Amino acid sequence: MNVEFKYYKPGQGTWARWTAGIFGGLLSIFASHSLYLFPAMEKIDAVGNVTGRTFWGKQIAASLPGIKQGLTVGLLGATLLFIAGCLATYLFAVNGRRAADFLIDVESEMHRVSWPTRPEWMGSSVVVIVSVVVIGGFVTLVDFLFRFVFTKTGIL
């Protein structure tokens, strides 16, 4: 695999790539935060008292600038996951040949889409909302009817 940090097909699919990169970065933030919080940092006994720290909460360094609690195994793991996630998003999702070609094609197709006007959009939305209410009412009525019949016959 050839890993280079130059931009594949510059100037093409810029909006789609930025959108994919932002969502990949947000996913990396969410994943690293979830990994940081996943294992309990403190050991808690049955009463609820803190009795110590788990391996995930063990201190690696006592204090670092900007980090009040010191560097823990969990914080280090979450940071490494964030860096790896952002790098993977750049290399594969944004700048990988197949993914970049796909995103370029998506952006070019989105320019060809015939977007509805505001009155068309409002009319379609009203039709969908009314349809959902009518179908929901019908399903609710049939549910009550079946429940009544099954209760009277002793099935329920």
Image (spheres, rainbow, N blue to C red):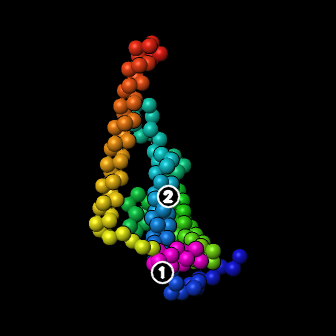
What amino acid is at disc 1? Thr
Circle 2 crowding by C-alpha within 10 Å: few under 14, some 14–19, many from 20: some
Q: Which mark is residue 14?
A: 1
Dot 2 corresponds to which residue? 31
Residue at point 33%, 54% (across, down): 127
Quadrant (top left, top right, bottom left, bottom right) of the N terminus? bottom right
- Residue closest to the eye, 115 or 1: 115
Q: Nearer the viewer, mark 2 or mark 1?
A: 1
| Residue 147: percent from left, percent from top | 40, 23
Circle 1 crowding by C-alpha within 10 Å: few under 14, some 14–19, many from 20: some
Per the image, label 1 sits on a secondary structure element best described as: helix
CB within 8 Å, label 2 to label 1: no
Residue at point 34%, 37% (across, down): 137
> Which secondary structure is most common in the magenta stretch?
helix
Cα separation, mark 2 vs mark 1, equals 25 Å
Evaluate whether residue 28 shows in this view: yes
What amino acid is at disc 2? Ala
Residue at point 34%, 59% (across, down): 124
Residue at point 57%, 85% (across, down): 9
- Quick check: is 113 in the magenta stretch? no
| Residue 114: percent from left, percent from top | 42, 73
Evaluate whether residue 59 shows in this view: no
Nearest to N terminus: mark 2 or mark 1: 1
- Quick check: is 110 in the magenta stretch? yes
61 with respect to 67 (left or right): right
Quadrant (top left, top right, bottom left, bottom right) of the C terminus? top left
Is 83 above or below relative to 151? Answer: below
Q: Which residues are magenta?
A: 101-112
Q: How many marks?
A: 2
| Residue 54: percent from left, percent from top | 51, 46
Per the image, label 2 sits on a secondary structure element best described as: helix
